Image (cartoon, rainbow, N blue to C red):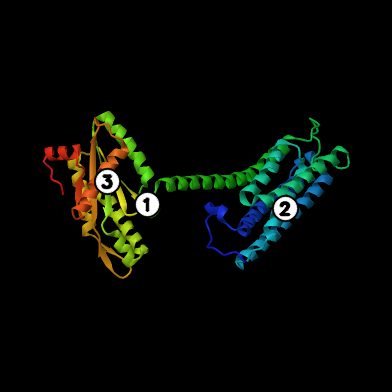
Amino acid sequence: MPAVERNPLPITDLLDWSDRDKSLLLSVLTGLLMLGFLGWLLLTVNYTRFGEQFLSVEGAGLARDIFLFNVTGWLLLTCWGIVLHKTKRHSVAYPNVCIHFFGFSFLGIGYVMGLYNPIMGLVLVGSPLTGFILFDFKRVTCSLVIHTIMVLAIYALIVQGKLQYAPLLKADPVTKDLVSVYWVNSMIAFSVPFLAMVFGFTYVLLRRWQIRENQIRDLAVTDPLTGLSNRRALFDQFSYELARSRRSGGSVSVCVMDLDHFKQINDRYGHGAGDRVLERVAEILKGSLRETDRVGRIGGEEFMLLMPETDLNGAALVVERCRKGIEAQRIALSDVSISVTASFGVACVRGDEVLSEEQIFCQADKALYHAKEKGRNRVEFWHGQTEQRLQEAGAGIY
């Protein structure tokens, strides 16, 4: 079955690109690197004194042929990839050829310049790393095994004297060493673009991991429908605020809210309409709360409001504002707009009271039950110490 063609993605979403497009990018970047190697060789041999001093004539001819072959190969692969991209076609062979030719290209360069040195070592390690970042494990492993065998074979032939080590290089006339200062500087200069490419791909990979980790963290604490905190996140915040109130001696108020007759909305208009109502109610609640307050969806049509450093009088004002905001709002559905109401149960605890989060929540839930019993679309407070303090403060019960 042909792959589904998606809209072009930015470079930051490189890992989501198709294998065709990733191979095309690899072809362009590696082709430019190979062109740089060829240009360096031609410049050194024809226009500097270093060519005669440090490079072998026979080796320079071999290196020129290898570099030219690499440049031609990557040019052809780039053209192939462009044709596939323009025609929106995918080819299993194209990524495989690019992966294998990537290894062959650097293997040839490593042979003429010397495989066993730190700089080429970085290149030979960076090559499979690039492959593992961009492509699936099986493809890259196959290529890695083939080229590892080839490296060992070249090494064996060099040891046996059947191949010359680093045929491009000529011993430094002063140090009698193949590794001259000019060669080192040249290799550093040409390793930088390659390593920059590898680091760029690695950055994209690490950035993707970071984004996914943040998404997973957000999913763990966020209700996916409303974007509010979920039960877990809200109770974690509740524990923190309760501990803080005990240290400071302040108050924490909690409200449990439930939409009235929500099941009838689902039955009459469908669950999609019910979701739209929940989303709009969430927006109203967020707009009605203070900056320090927290709200979350704890299940179904039930929401929880957390009000730090807030006594019953303050909680009554905040919750009543939420109730009126929901009552006054007409929520537009596909072909009709409807009104909804909600019932609220509030509990408040002072820092000197020893109650757990679950106990306080149960108190607010009992108050919500009383609000439902008394006709809905109202605010009720926990019947206990909270009610006594509320009456002492002179506040009424809604």
Kindly state the secondary structure of the residue where label 2 is placed: helix
Disc on the earlier residue, 3 or 2: 2
In the picture of the structure, the residue carrying the numbered disc 1 is 227
Report the side of 124 relative to 133 (left or right).
right
Nearer to us: label 3 or label 2: 3
Q: Which corner quadrant of the image does residue 262 belong to?
A: bottom left
* Cα distance between the residues tagged 3 and 2: 65 Å
Q: Which mark is residue 83?
A: none
Q: Nearer the viewer, residue 285 or 180?
A: 285
In the picture of the structure, the residue carrying the numbered disc 3 is 365
Pinpoint residue 189: horizontal percent, then vertical percent. 66, 41
Disc on the earlier residue, 1 or 3: 1
Q: Is residue 49 visible?
A: no
Report the side of 313 relative to 302 (left or right).
left
In the depicted structure, whether residue 98 falls above or below residue 182: below
Pinpoint residue 83: horizontal percent, then vertical percent. 64, 66
Kindly state the secondary structure of the residue where label 3 is placed: helix
In the picture of the structure, the residue carrying the numbered disc 2 is 100
Q: Quadrant of the N terminus?
A: bottom right
Nearer to us: label 1 or label 3: 3
Residue at x-position 68% and y-position 51%: 138
Kindly state the secondary structure of the residue where label 1 is placed: loop
Residue at x-position 77% and y-position 51%: 66
Report the side of 152 relative to 22 (left or right).
right
Q: Nearer the viewer, residue 270 or 228?
A: 270
* Cα distance between the residues tagged 1 and 3: 23 Å
Pinpoint residue 139: horizontal percent, then vertical percent. 69, 52
In the depicted structure, whether residue 201 falls above or below residue 250: below
Amino acid, disc 1: Gly
Q: Is residue 377 visible?
A: yes
